[in-house]
């Protein structure tokens, strides 16, 4: 959808806080929309997992874009693309922005870690940051490449993930805002949101702050709002729920003597038909037949 960027910008202005849920293909993105979220997060962790690959900069930009563009085709809510480190240097980022914007994506998020990156929550993972100047160059390239001013460049700060502290995070946030970032995503792997709240309460930036509370799941929407956070992303819970449900079902099915013995909960065929809009196709066929009659092709 081409209007995603405009819609996301409007939602940020109108709503106190936006709720965004992760998707990993067109179906999961559509389910996010049908359950009244404001936008879909096309997360690199989830998309990599559906390819049975590590979240470690292995899939190409083209592969990520292919999945994300199908989400945009399926949904009428904005799609926010997790683009890791931007798939290379400033020239790669410039190319990436042009491709994602033309595909109808509303926003891209790039993070200030070195390539190849590792998932931020990986135990004992390598979390090395790019020099500030080099990441600023990526933001400048992204800003100069977008056509629609409402297409958002989200700068994801990994200073807290790397253990460099709130002061380093604020220093980088200032630099990224000055370079033209449209929002700051501040990330932490602590089990409490204290350092996130310290950042939010002491940083004097003017652009929206985004949080991903995967590691501190008990934080409330009200608490996030009270600390100036404008968007919360539930990044990977959809993937993990799907993985759990499929695993449990297949375990039971593998030892069952018949389908009737399997007691796992399943969606009905009818519900899938509605998701696929099968009945809309039938209506289209009827409408076409009526028009063919009017034109004299059918008696």
Image (cartoon, helix red, strand yellow):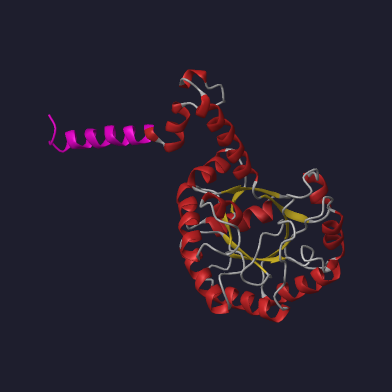
Q: Does any portion of residue 176 appear in the rendered image?
A: yes
Give the residue drawn at x 32%, y 32%.
282
- Left/right placement of residue 279 relative to residue 14 reads left
In terms of depth relative to the viewer, which is nearer, 109 or 75? 109
Image coordinates for residue 4, horizontal then vertical, percent: 53, 56
Q: Does any portion of residue 1 appear in the rendered image?
A: no
Image coordinates for residue 48, horizontal then vertical, percent: 55, 55
Image coordinates for residue 143, horizontal then vertical, percent: 59, 74
Q: Is residue 286 magenta?
A: yes
How many numbered circles are shown?
0
- Left/right placement of residue 277 relative to residue 286 reads right
Q: Quadrant of residue 144?
A: bottom right
Q: Magenta region, mostly helix, strand or loop? A: helix
Does residue 206 sit above or below 2 in this rendering?
A: below
In terms of depth relative to the viewer, which is nearer, 76 or 21? 21
Q: Is residue 295 magenta?
A: yes
- Left/right placement of residue 252 relative to residue 181 reads left
Point out the residue furthest to the top here: 260
In terms of depth relative to the viewer, which is nearer, 20 or 61? 61
Does residue 226 sit above or below 187 in this rendering?
A: above
Quarter in which the C terminus is drawn: top left
Give the residue drawn at x 48%, y 58%.
2
- Left/right placement of residue 265 relative to residue 183 reads left
In terms of depth relative to the viewer, which is nearer, 148 or 252? 252
Q: What stretch of residues is rendered in magenta? A: 279-299
Give the residue drawn at x 61%, y 69%.
116
Image coordinates for residue 250, horizontal then vertical, percent: 53, 32
Does residue 21 sit above or below 295 in this rendering?
A: below
């Amino acid at each position: 959808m081409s209007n995603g960027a405009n819609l996301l910008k409007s939602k940020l202005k109108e709503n106190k806080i936006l709720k965004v849920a992760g998707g990993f293909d067109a179906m999961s993105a559509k389910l996010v929309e049908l359950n009244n979220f404001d936008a879909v997060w096309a997360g690199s962790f989830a998309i990599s997992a559906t390819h049975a690959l590590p979240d470690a900069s292995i899939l190409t930009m083209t592969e990520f874009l292919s999945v994300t563009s199908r989400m945009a085709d399926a949904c009428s809510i904005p799609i926010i693309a997790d683009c890791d480190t931007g798939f290379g240097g400033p020239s790669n980022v410039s190319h990436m922005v042009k491709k994602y914007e033309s595909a109808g994506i509303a926003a891209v998020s790039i993070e200030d870690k070195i390539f190849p990156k590792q998932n931020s929550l990986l135990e004992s993972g390598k979390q090395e940051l790019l020099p500030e100047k080099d990441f600023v160059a990526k933001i400048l390239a992204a800003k100069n490449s977008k056509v629609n001013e409402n297409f958002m460049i989200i700068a994801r700060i990994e200073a807290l993930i790397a253990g460099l502290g709130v002061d380093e995070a604020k220093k980088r946030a200032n630099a990224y805002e000055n370079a033209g970032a449209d929002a700051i995503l501040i990330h932490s792997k602590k089990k409490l949101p204290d350092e996130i709240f310290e950042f939010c309460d002491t940083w004097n930036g003017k652009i929206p702050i985004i949080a991903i509370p995967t590691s501190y799941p008990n934080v409330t929407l009200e608490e996030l709002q009270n600390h100036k956070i404008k968007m919360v992303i539930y990044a990977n819970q959809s993937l993990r729920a799907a993985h759990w449900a499929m695993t449990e079902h297949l375990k039971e099915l593998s030892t069952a003597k018949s389908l009737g013995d399997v007691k796992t909960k399943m969606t009905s065929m009818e519900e899938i038909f509605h998701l696929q809009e099968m009945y809309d196709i039938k209506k289209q066929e009827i409408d076409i037949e009526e028009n063919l009659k009017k034109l004299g092709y059918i008696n």
